[in-house]
Image (spheres, rainbow, N blue to C red):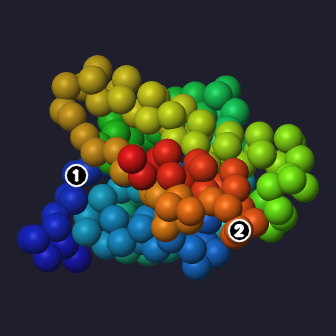
Amino acid sequence: MPNGLFDLQDKVAIVTGAGANGGLGHTLAIGLAGQGADVAVLDLDEQGAQTSAQQIRALGRKSLSVRCDVSKPDEVECFFLQVDRAFGKIDILINNAYSFPSRVHPDELTLEAWGKTIAVSLTAYFLCAQQAIRRMLKHGTGGSIVNIGSIAGVSALGRGNLPYSVAKGVSTN
Protein backbone atom coordinates (compact mmCIF):
# COMPACT_ATOMS: atom_id res chain seq x y z
CA MET A 1 0.00 0.00 0.00
CA PRO A 2 1.43 3.40 -0.96
CA ASN A 3 2.73 5.35 2.02
CA GLY A 4 2.22 8.86 0.63
CA LEU A 5 5.93 9.60 0.35
CA PHE A 6 6.32 7.54 -2.80
CA ASP A 7 2.82 7.21 -4.22
CA LEU A 8 2.65 5.78 -7.73
CA GLN A 9 -1.13 5.31 -7.93
CA ASP A 10 -2.36 5.45 -11.53
CA LYS A 11 1.21 5.28 -12.89
CA VAL A 12 2.38 2.69 -15.40
CA ALA A 13 5.92 1.37 -15.13
CA ILE A 14 8.03 -0.88 -17.33
CA VAL A 15 10.96 -2.83 -15.94
CA THR A 16 13.33 -4.65 -18.29
CA GLY A 17 15.09 -7.75 -17.05
CA ALA A 18 12.41 -8.24 -14.40
CA GLY A 19 12.17 -12.02 -14.33
CA ALA A 20 11.57 -13.55 -10.90
CA ASN A 21 15.13 -14.64 -10.31
CA GLY A 22 15.62 -12.60 -7.18
CA GLY A 23 17.50 -9.97 -9.14
CA LEU A 24 17.28 -6.20 -9.10
CA GLY A 25 14.71 -5.97 -11.91
CA HIS A 26 12.29 -8.26 -10.10
CA THR A 27 12.78 -6.38 -6.85
CA LEU A 28 12.19 -3.02 -8.55
CA ALA A 29 9.04 -4.28 -10.29
CA ILE A 30 7.57 -5.56 -7.02
CA GLY A 31 8.56 -2.34 -5.23
CA LEU A 32 6.87 -0.16 -7.86
CA ALA A 33 3.70 -2.25 -7.59
CA GLY A 34 3.86 -1.98 -3.82
CA GLN A 35 3.68 1.79 -4.23
CA GLY A 36 0.63 1.60 -6.48
CA ALA A 37 2.02 1.35 -10.03
CA ASP A 38 0.79 -1.06 -12.66
CA VAL A 39 3.88 -2.78 -14.02
CA ALA A 40 4.82 -4.34 -17.34
CA VAL A 41 7.71 -6.76 -16.98
CA LEU A 42 9.85 -8.22 -19.70
CA ASP A 43 12.65 -10.71 -19.65
CA LEU A 44 14.20 -13.38 -21.85
CA ASP A 45 13.03 -15.80 -19.16
CA GLU A 46 9.34 -16.01 -20.00
CA GLN A 47 8.46 -18.06 -16.91
CA GLY A 48 10.35 -15.64 -14.68
CA ALA A 49 8.48 -12.69 -16.19
CA GLN A 50 5.16 -14.49 -15.65
CA THR A 51 6.04 -15.19 -12.03
CA SER A 52 6.91 -11.52 -11.46
CA ALA A 53 3.61 -10.48 -13.05
CA GLN A 54 1.68 -12.89 -10.83
CA GLN A 55 3.33 -11.41 -7.74
CA ILE A 56 2.45 -7.91 -8.94
CA ARG A 57 -1.19 -8.92 -9.46
CA ALA A 58 -1.20 -10.43 -5.95
CA LEU A 59 -0.49 -6.88 -4.73
CA GLY A 60 -3.69 -5.72 -6.44
CA ARG A 61 -1.98 -4.11 -9.43
CA LYS A 62 -2.31 -4.79 -13.14
CA SER A 63 0.62 -6.46 -14.84
CA LEU A 64 1.75 -7.61 -18.25
CA SER A 65 4.56 -10.11 -18.76
CA VAL A 66 6.31 -10.58 -22.07
CA ARG A 67 9.30 -12.57 -23.24
CA CYS A 68 11.40 -10.02 -25.09
CA ASP A 69 14.96 -9.77 -26.34
CA VAL A 70 15.59 -6.07 -25.72
CA SER A 71 18.55 -6.09 -28.09
CA LYS A 72 16.20 -6.64 -31.05
CA PRO A 73 14.39 -3.49 -32.23
CA ASP A 74 11.40 -5.38 -33.64
CA GLU A 75 10.82 -7.23 -30.34
CA VAL A 76 11.11 -3.99 -28.36
CA GLU A 77 8.60 -2.26 -30.63
CA CYS A 78 6.21 -5.22 -30.35
CA PHE A 79 6.51 -5.12 -26.55
CA PHE A 80 5.71 -1.41 -26.41
CA LEU A 81 2.68 -1.93 -28.66
CA GLN A 82 1.45 -4.54 -26.16
CA VAL A 83 1.95 -2.02 -23.35
CA ASP A 84 -0.05 0.52 -25.36
CA ARG A 85 -2.95 -1.92 -25.66
CA ALA A 86 -2.80 -3.06 -22.04
CA PHE A 87 -2.26 0.29 -20.28
CA GLY A 88 -2.57 3.15 -22.78
CA LYS A 89 0.40 5.07 -21.39
CA ILE A 90 3.87 4.86 -19.86
CA ASP A 91 5.04 6.92 -16.91
CA ILE A 92 8.20 5.11 -15.83
CA LEU A 93 10.81 3.06 -17.67
CA ILE A 94 13.51 1.25 -15.76
CA ASN A 95 16.20 -0.07 -18.09
CA ASN A 96 17.68 -2.91 -16.08
CA ALA A 97 18.33 -5.79 -18.52
CA TYR A 98 21.96 -6.77 -18.95
CA SER A 99 24.20 -9.43 -20.41
CA PHE A 100 27.33 -10.49 -18.60
CA PRO A 101 29.79 -12.57 -20.63
CA SER A 102 32.01 -15.25 -19.24
CA ARG A 103 34.92 -13.69 -17.43
CA VAL A 104 37.81 -13.59 -19.85
CA HIS A 105 40.83 -11.41 -20.34
CA PRO A 106 40.24 -8.76 -23.06
CA ASP A 107 42.66 -10.44 -25.47
CA GLU A 108 40.53 -13.60 -25.32
CA LEU A 109 37.16 -11.88 -25.72
CA THR A 110 35.28 -12.76 -28.89
CA LEU A 111 33.57 -10.16 -31.02
CA GLU A 112 30.34 -12.14 -30.61
CA ALA A 113 30.51 -11.91 -26.80
CA TRP A 114 31.37 -8.20 -27.02
CA GLY A 115 28.46 -7.54 -29.38
CA LYS A 116 25.88 -9.42 -27.32
CA THR A 117 26.83 -7.64 -24.10
CA ILE A 118 26.85 -4.18 -25.70
CA ALA A 119 23.52 -4.90 -27.45
CA VAL A 120 21.71 -5.94 -24.24
CA SER A 121 23.50 -3.77 -21.68
CA LEU A 122 23.66 -0.55 -23.69
CA THR A 123 21.92 -0.46 -27.09
CA ALA A 124 18.74 -1.91 -25.59
CA TYR A 125 18.60 1.02 -23.16
CA PHE A 126 18.47 3.35 -26.17
CA LEU A 127 15.84 1.24 -27.96
CA CYS A 128 13.54 1.11 -24.93
CA ALA A 129 14.08 4.76 -24.00
CA GLN A 130 13.29 5.83 -27.56
CA GLN A 131 10.00 3.91 -27.55
CA ALA A 132 9.08 5.24 -24.09
CA ILE A 133 9.96 8.86 -24.94
CA ARG A 134 7.80 8.75 -28.05
CA ARG A 135 4.83 7.72 -25.96
CA MET A 136 5.54 10.16 -23.13
CA LEU A 137 5.72 13.03 -25.63
CA LYS A 138 2.58 11.89 -27.45
CA HIS A 139 0.59 11.87 -24.21
CA GLY A 140 2.18 15.08 -22.93
CA THR A 141 2.45 13.71 -19.41
CA GLY A 142 6.21 13.46 -19.09
CA GLY A 143 7.73 10.61 -17.20
CA SER A 144 10.89 9.13 -15.78
CA ILE A 145 13.52 6.93 -17.37
CA VAL A 146 16.01 5.22 -15.10
CA ASN A 147 19.06 3.49 -16.58
CA ILE A 148 20.63 1.04 -14.16
CA GLY A 149 24.41 1.29 -14.12
CA SER A 150 27.01 -0.59 -12.16
CA ILE A 151 30.13 0.06 -10.15
CA ALA A 152 31.77 -2.17 -12.78
CA GLY A 153 31.51 0.84 -15.11
CA VAL A 154 34.29 2.55 -13.18
CA SER A 155 37.02 0.07 -14.04
CA ALA A 156 37.02 -2.37 -16.93
CA LEU A 157 40.47 -3.89 -17.04
CA GLY A 158 41.52 -6.73 -14.81
CA ARG A 159 37.98 -7.80 -13.94
CA GLY A 160 37.37 -10.01 -16.96
CA ASN A 161 34.19 -8.16 -17.91
CA LEU A 162 35.33 -5.52 -20.39
CA PRO A 163 32.14 -5.17 -22.50
CA TYR A 164 29.87 -5.11 -19.43
CA SER A 165 32.06 -2.47 -17.79
CA VAL A 166 32.09 -0.35 -20.95
CA ALA A 167 28.29 -0.57 -21.29
CA LYS A 168 27.65 0.23 -17.64
CA GLY A 169 30.17 3.05 -17.61
CA VAL A 170 28.36 4.70 -20.50
CA SER A 171 24.90 4.10 -19.03
CA THR A 172 25.81 5.79 -15.74
CA ASN A 173 27.10 9.01 -17.27
Q: Where is residue 51? Give x, y as percent.
A: 61, 70
Q: Quadrant of residue 71?
A: top right
Numbered-mark total:
2
Q: Which residue of the protein is positioned furthest toward the top in this rendering?
A: 138
Marks 2 and 1 sit apart, C-alpha to C-alpha, by 46 Å
Q: Which residue appears at 10% of the width and 71% of the height?
A: 5
Task: Note whether residue 57 is visible.
Answer: no
Residue tagged 1: 10
Q: Nearer the viewer, residue 51 or 107?
A: 107
Number of residues whose C-alpha sits closer than 10 Å to that of mark 1, classed few (under 14), some (14–19) or many (20 or more): few
Q: Earlier in the sequence, mark 2 or mark 1?
A: 1
In the image, residue 103 sits, relative to residue 66, either above or below, namely below
Q: Secondary structure at mark 1?
A: loop
Q: Quadrant of residue 48?
A: bottom right
Pointer 2 and pointer 1: residues touching (CB < 8 Å)? no
Number of residues whose C-alpha sits closer than 10 Å to that of mark 2, classed few (under 14), some (14–19) or many (20 or more): few
Q: Where is residue 82? Give x, y as percent.
A: 53, 36
Q: Which residue of the protein is positioned furthest toward the left in this rendering?
A: 4
Q: Where is residue 74? Give x, y as percent.
A: 67, 26
| Quarter of the figure with the N terminus | bottom left
Q: Which residue appears at 69% of the width and 33% of the height?
A: 72
In the picture, the disc for residue 31 is none
Q: Where is residue 60? Give x, y as percent.
A: 35, 69
Residue tagged 2: 158
Q: Nearer the viewer, residue 167 or 30?
A: 167
Amino acid type assigned to the residue bearing label 2 in the image:
Gly
Task: Note whether residue 149 is visible.
Answer: yes
